[in-house]
Image: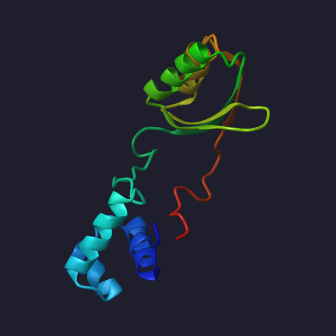
Amino acid sequence: MKIDATDRALLAALQRDSTLTAEALGRMLNLSPSQVGRRRQRLEAAGLIRGYGARLDARRAGLTVQAFVQVQMATHAPDKVKGFIRLVETRPEITAAWTLTGEADYLLQVHCEDLAALNRLIHEALLPDPAVARVQSQIVMNVLKADAPLPV
């Protein structure tokens, strides 16, 4: 799908504030609200806009520990990997997960109430999984830049 400069401006504005009305977006982009609505629907239908949501402050939500956990697999047998993926998908404290090249097979972003909760996740959920060989965690000390909008 081709996107033009107006689409890019619309996407940038929505990334900054997804609650903007068609009227407000129209004023920003020099378009009518109906034109903005059609463009927005087209971008949604094409999958460029995957959804809308609220960004929560983890600390104010009681999640004082953020960590990145690297997981090295003991096996890549499909049934074992499926079990591990199911574990990742069902643990609410794992907020994002990526497969990687290099030594670690997965990188997990984790938000926990405290260090004890992180310890329980690692020692009671991740390490006992039969597909997992090794886990290494890094605790986030300070967030310099988080959830930045994509460059459009």
Relative to the observer, which residue lies in front, 69 or 117? 69
Farthest residue, direction front: 1
Q: Residue at x 50, y 21 (%)?
A: 87
**Looking at the image, is 28 positioned above or below residue 67?**
below
Is 65 on the left-hand or right-hand side of 133?
Answer: left
Q: Is residue 120 visible?
A: no
Q: Quadrant of residue 70?
A: top right
Relative to the observer, which residue lies in front, 20 or 5? 5
Is 70 on the left-hand or right-hand side of 148?
Answer: right
Relative to the observer, which residue lies in front, 144 or 19? 19
The x and y percentages for residue 129 are 60, 13
In which quadrant of the rendered image does the N terminus lie? bottom left
Q: Quadrant of residue 119?
A: top right
Q: Residue at x 46, y 81 (%)?
A: 5
The x and y percentages for residue 58 are 45, 45
The x and y percentages for residue 57 are 43, 50
Q: Residue at x 60, y 14 (%)?
A: 80
Q: Is residue 90 visible?
A: yes
The x and y percentages for residue 139 are 65, 38
